[in-house]
Amino acid sequence: MSFYLYIILGFLGGIPAGMGMGGGTVTIPLLVLIGGVEQKLAQCANLFAFLPMSGFAIKTHVNNKLVRTEGITWLILPALAFSLFGAILATWLPSVLLRRAFGAFLLVLALIGFIRLKND
């Protein structure tokens, strides 16, 4: 039964990811709250799924001439460094802390969304 549950959860998380709305904000809570997956494993699964999706997205944006490459090195290098730092930090932090931090992030994201909605 769990195999089918994870297929359904992947489908539900993949819908917003395919629409460019950040599937991780849906996938991670689904895996943790419904799938019973540990927070670190849920975040790892989300990042693993992100790799091929981002490759296809970059290819599509390049084909549509929506990518400007001037100054891109100054974005890539810090992003790689901080991603590595974050990955190492996440391996040391307890899952409870990661779960709470991600929950706080989602609450802040929701609050920003409500404020923007109110201002529009």
Image (cartoon, rainbow, N blue to C red):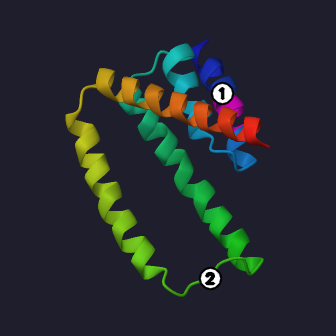
Residue to which mark 2 is pinned: 68
State which quarter of the image contains the N terminus: top right
Specify the amino acid type for callout 1: Ile
Residue 37 covered by magenta stretch: no
Is label 2 or label 1 in front?
A: 2
Secondary structure under tag 1 reads helix
Which residue, as the protein is rendered here, is positioned at the far left?
92
Residue 12 covered by magenta stretch: yes
Image-quadrant location for residue 34: top right
In the image: residue 55, left or right of residue 8? left
Secondary structure under tag 2 reads loop
Residue drawn where x is 39% and y is 22% of the image: 38
Give how far across and how far down residue 56 sits, in percent.
66, 63
Residue drawn where x is 42% and y is 39% of the image: 44
Residue 38, compared with residue 69, is above or below; it is above
Q: How many marks?
A: 2
Residue 63, compared with residue 12, is above or below; it is below
User: Camera-side residue: 20 or 47?
Assistant: 20
Labels 2 & 1 near each other (Cβ < 8 A): no
Residue to which mark 1 is pinned: 7
In the image: residue 115, left or right of residue 104? right
Specify the amino acid type for callout 2: Arg
Prevailing secondary structure of the magenta residues: helix
How far apart marks 2 and 1 lie (CA) works out to 37 Å
- Magenta residues span 10-15
Which residue, as the protein is rendered here, is positioned at the far top?
1
Q: Residues within 10 Å of mark 2 (few under 14, many from 20)?
A: few
